[in-house]
Image (tube, rainbow, N blue to C red):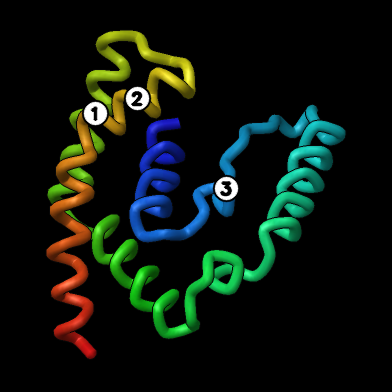
Amino acid sequence: MGVSALVKKVLAEVGINPDRFGLQWASAAEAPRFVKLITDFTMKTKELGPIGQAEGLTPEELKVRIDKALALVSDRKLRIALGNATKTIRKEAIFTQDGITALIEEKLSKTITAGLEGGGAEVAAKK
């Protein structure tokens, strides 16, 4: 759940609708639930429209934003911060999605903002 909260936060920060990402668990014994999860996510994605276009981005702007997000999640500082947040989640027994999302927001916002500012410069320099 921590990774899901992180991905949604990063998508929102780069201007991509975070509802484009979904992570749900279903066991092999839950075939009807699995079908419902996939069907619901597919319908939601169709409602959102094509990525980038639905967010009002040109293909070039979308690529830059995705490159920024990729650089951020590949950064060692963010991975360490997520690991530390995960330790806090376990230690404090925060097991609800709302609690985990709030903790990710609290513990990783500065790292995400700094990484995107730095990642943006790195991405621009590569072009």
On the rendered structure, is 21 left or right of 13? right
On the rendered structure, is 65 left or right of 40? left
Query: Between disc 3 and disc 2, whose residue precedes?
Result: 3
Q: Quadrant of residue 48?
A: bottom right
Q: Quadrant of residue 50?
A: bottom right
Question: Badge 2 local density, few (<14 within 10 Å), some, or many (20+)?
Answer: few
From this view, report whether residue 40 is shown above or below residue 33: below
Mark 2 and 1 residues: CB-CB less than 8 Å, in contact? yes
Q: CA distance from mark 3 to mark 2?
A: 17 Å
Mark 3 and 2 residues: CB-CB less than 8 Å, in contact? no
Q: Which residue is mark 3?
A: 19
The residue sitting at 83% across, 35% down in the picture is 31
Q: Which residue is mark 1?
A: 106
State the quadrant of the C terminus. Answer: bottom left
Tell me how many marks there are: 3
The residue sitting at 58% across, 68% down in the picture is 51
> Could you tell me residue 46's position as x and y percent?
74, 60
Q: Amino acid at mark 2?
A: Ala
The residue sitting at 57% across, 41% down in the picture is 23
Secondary structure type for disc 3 = helix
On the rendered structure, is 114 left or right of 79? left
Q: Amino acid at mark 1?
A: Glu
